[in-house]
Amino acid sequence: MTQPDELSRRGMLMKLGLLFNAAVGTILAVPIMRYVLSPMIRERNAGHDPWVALGLLDKFPPGQTRFATYRHPSANPSDGETANIPCWVRHVDGEKFQVFAINCAHLGCPVRWFPQSGLFMCPCHGGVYYQDGSRASGPPERGLFEYRYKVEQGKLLIQAGEMPTTGVPTASLTNISVKRPPCA
């Protein structure tokens, strides 16, 4: 028999098990809490400016679409070339621009601009977009993703902190006849 002051084998294993579970719980809680609290931490981060300059307005002639790149605002030095993000800039007129993500809205393949036809084309599955980014044909169900932009001190800036999503589609479906099939 054991004395009441002595630690039994069962009691020792129970305490070791509780200690182990507490350690694992703490290790798992740290990244989960960082994830949950990240929006509050991100708002207080003063060094992160989501507005990135694409260049002077002279770089983008009116009526033309040009290829541009920017460095992601939260890039680390170890990111290398992968932090350089491409986009398409369409200068409509004056200070009106459209800045498109290079990714197709179908599966994210890079679209190319063809000035001869005035179309963006995706090489992966044949997605085609008009010069204003709206869907022309192919598997994508919406237009190209657009970045928010602003013009300050003769420079074009885009809000590049977040990837564009399908929140507000650029393409609108108008003049669709119910009587005829869409491919006729």
Image: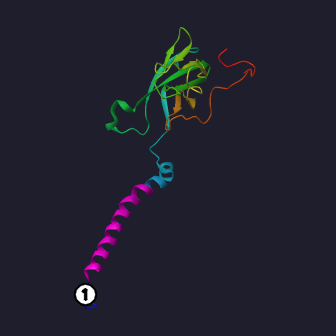
Asked whether, in this view, residue 8 is left or right of residue 40, the answer is left
| Quadrant (top left/top right/bottom left/bottom right) for the N terminus | bottom left
Residue 147: give x, y in percent of width and height.
Answer: 55, 31
Task: Count up the numbered dots.
Answer: 1
Q: Is residue 119 located in the magenta-colored stretch of the structure? A: no
Which residue range is magenta in the image?
A: 8-33
> For the residue marked with disc 1, what is the amino acid?
Glu
Quadrant of residue 150 within the rendered picture: top right
Task: Establish if 124 lies above or below 75.
Answer: above
Residue 39: give x, y in percent of width and height.
Answer: 51, 50
Give the camera-side residue of 19 and 48: 19
Residue 21: give x, y in percent of width and height.
Answer: 35, 67
Task: Establish if 116 lies above or below 171.
Answer: above
Q: Which residue is mark 1?
A: 6
The rendered magenta stretch, by its main secondary structure, is classed as helix
Task: Establish if 74 lies above or below 99.
Answer: below
